[in-house]
């Protein structure tokens, strides 16, 4: 069985973008692949997090993984810091990555261009840690949203370089990006991706938003003055985004939704999108509450860490031997 691996940063609450672009795909794949999913807590401290908030977000993230349908019987679910090999291989891979490669990463470049102050060394070397996350498990596929494609491509380059230098060691992974929903845009500014680190939260729907405020965010989503319901991503990005959200969640094609609402006002379409989103959120939130109340999270994470370590530690051992870091061979 081919292996698939992915992670989500528990920086703040998980969003509808995370769900559509990543999480729900993990759930779909867990029957046909050996699925390894983790909470990327090391990645989220590349920017300061309030410790209390971080702790709460970690628990919520695990509960939400499960509430969205990830089954610990089928998938390995764990916390990144519970498997020490991630940090160690991350350092080793940073020693096999060039500054020029890291300078080209869009996420880093965008932050630099915006003149962000206080950027950390951790943020800069983040793609090396991400490569370690993937390569430790010899994952064949990495399901991610569009914004992470470049990081997975860098991971492939690092893996190939390592294999060339030290002999065949890592499986070279492929990014897996869904056709619909790979980049859900902000409801208040459809030129930006829906992001949990957005300054105002008007454009972002969180999976734990109360249904009333989720509906309100959709009903006041920024659209355009064209006034025609059609698929024109360039000129009507806000409308396109709403239709894409509804299509991803309902399984209907975007064209089918346009057909149903063509000739209507935007309000009617928005109300439909709100219905679809709220129905999905309600299901997730009900399961989330049950999971929190059942106190099973610690057990799931302990078992997940054991399974994950047994794979990751073996890979790291092999890497250290190949590099010449070990006295015994
Ligand atoms: P931030 O919002 O702070 O930039 P993030 O949500 O992108 O963070 P993660 O939580 O690590 O960072 O993302 C987890 C997964 O969700 C990744 O695979 C990412 O590509 C995907 N994802 C995040 N936002 C969106 C979005 N708006 N549309 C589709 N996929 C997304
Ligand atoms: N970088 C990703 C989160 C992440 C990840 C990974 C995704 C960390 N390690 C390994 C896939 C595989 C993000 O910011 N969205």
Image (tube, helix red, strand yellow):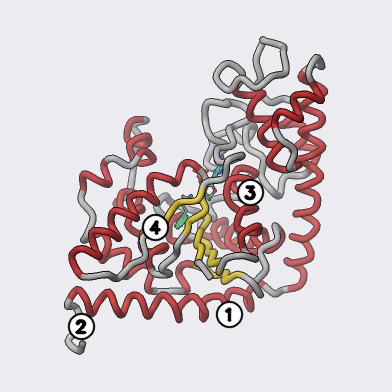
Q: Give me the residue at 26% from left, 66% from top.
A: 92
Which residue is label 1 attached to?
303
As displayed, is residue 286 above or below residue 136? above
Residue 140 falls in image quadrant: bottom left
**Location of residue 138 in the rendering, given as x and y in whole percent from the top left corner:** 41, 68
The yes-or-no answer for disc 4 within 8 Å of ligand 2 is yes
Q: Is residue 312 above or below residue 193?
A: below
Name the side, left or right, on which 259 lies relative to 168: right
Residue positioned 35% across, 53% down in the render: 127
Residue at disc 3, secondary structure: helix
Choose top left, top right, bottom left or bottom right for residue 265.
top right
Question: Would you name the residue on which mark 3 appears?
Answer: 19
How many neighbours does mark 2 have within 10 angstroms: few (below 14), some (14-19), or many (20 or more)?
A: few
Of the image marks 2 and 3, the number of the one nearer the N terminus: 3
Helix, strand or loop status at disc 2:
loop
Q: Give the total number of marks visible in the rendering.
A: 4
Distance of label 2 from label 1 (alpha carbons): 29 Å
Q: Are marks 2 and 3 in contact (CB under 8 Å)?
A: no
Q: Which of marks 1 and 3 precedes in the sequence? A: 3
Which quadrant: the C terminus? bottom left
How far, Cα to Cα, is label 4 from label 1?
22 Å
Determine which quarter of the picture holds residue 270.
top right
Which dot marks residue 130?
Answer: 4
In the picture, the disc for residue 326 is 2
The answer to whether mark 2 is within 8 Å of ligand 2 is: no
- Left or right of 284? Residue 106 is left
Disc 1 crowd rating (10 Å Cα; few below 14, some 14-19, many 20+) is some
Depicted 160 relative to depicted 295: above or below? above
Question: Which of disc 1 and disc 2 is earlier in sequence?
Answer: 1
Q: Earlier in the sequence, mark 4 or mark 1?
A: 4
18 or 51: which is nearer to us? 18
Examine the rendered structure and indicate whether residue 269 appears above or below residue 211. above
């Amino acid at each position: 069985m081919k292996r698939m691996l992915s992670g989500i940063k528990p920086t703040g609450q998980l969003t509808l973008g995370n769900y559509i672009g990543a999480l729900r795909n993990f759930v779909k794949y867990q029957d046909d692949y050996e699925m390894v999913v983790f909470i990327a807590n090391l990645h989220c401290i590349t920017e300061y997090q309030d410790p209390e908030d971080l702790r709460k977000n970690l628990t919520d993230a695990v509960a939400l993984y499960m509430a969205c349908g990830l089954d610990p019987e089928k998938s390995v679910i764990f916390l990144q810091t519970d498997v020490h090999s991630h940090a160690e291989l991350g350092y080793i891979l940073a020693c096999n990555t060039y500054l020029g490669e890291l300078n080209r990463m869009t996420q880093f470049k965008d932050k630099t261009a915006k003149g962000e102050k206080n950027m950390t060394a951790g943020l800069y070397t983040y793609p090396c840690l991400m490569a370690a996350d993937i390569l430790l498990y010899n994952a064949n596929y990495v399901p991610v949203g569009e914004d992470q494609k470049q990081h997975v491509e860098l991971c492939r380059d690092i893996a190939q370089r390592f294999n060339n230098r030290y002999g065949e060691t890592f499986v070279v992974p492929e990014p897996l990006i869904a056709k619909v929903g790979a980049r859900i845009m902000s409801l208040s500014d459809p030129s930006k991706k829906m992001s949990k680190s957005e300054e105002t939260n008007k454009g972002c729907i969180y999976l734990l938003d109360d249904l009333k405020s989720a509906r309100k965010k959709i009903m006041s989503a920024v659209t355009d003055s064209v006034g025609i319901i059609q698929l024109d991503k360039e000129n009507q990005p806000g409308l396109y985004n709403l239709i894409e959200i509804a299509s991803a969640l309902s399984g209907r094609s975007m064209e089918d939704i346009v057909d149903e609402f063509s000739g209507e006002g935007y309000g009617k379409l928005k109300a439909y999108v709100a219905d679809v989103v709220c129905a999905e959120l309600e299901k997730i939130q009900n399961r989330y509450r049950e999971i929190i109340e059942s106190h099973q999270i610690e057990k799931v994470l302990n078992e997940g860490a054991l399974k994950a370590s047994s794979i990751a530690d073996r890979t790291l051992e092999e890497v250290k031997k190949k590099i010449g870091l070990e006295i015994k061979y």
